Amino acid sequence: MSRQPNSMFFRANLVQKMTEDLQMIGRSKRTQQAYLRAVRKLAEFCRKSPDQVFEQQVRRQLKLRARSARKGENHLATELIDGTARRSIQ
């Protein structure tokens, strides 16, 4: 497995909680890794913990990423906005 997606802004306890939540809803290992990577990138972009990020900041990051992102990454980002990740960080 690739390295754990911890960062200065995406702490191990939040990574663990989100991983457990994704496992409970039946997401595959690769999907879990993709979601965690996307949330880590969002946290680094906003320079704050994901549980402190507001929807406006998510939308701003998505607009910037959409210009160069592949279709699959856009789907992941849309799901993050729709609440999959939000449920994990509440």
Image: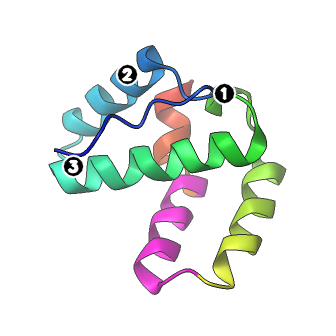
- The residue identified by callout 1 is 49
In depth, the one of 14 and 4 nearer the eye is: 4
Q: Where is residue 30 in the image (x, y as percent from the top left)?
A: 21, 55
Q: Is residue 54 left or right of residue 40?
A: right
Q: Distance between the residues labelled 3 and 1?
A: 23 Å
Which one is earlier in the sequence, the residue at label 1 or at label 2? 2
Q: Report helix, strand or loop for mark 3.
A: loop
Span of residues in magenta: 69-81
Q: Is residue 16 left or right of residue 45?
A: left
Q: Quadrant of residue 12?
A: top left
Q: Can you give x and y, in whole percent of width and height, for residue 66 in the image?
A: 65, 79
Q: Do the CB atoms of the residues marked 1 and 2 lie less than 8 Å apart?
A: no
Residue identified by numbered label 2: 17
Residue at image x 52%, y 75%? Answer: 74
Q: What residue type is labelled 2?
A: Lys
- Residue picked out by circle 3: 27
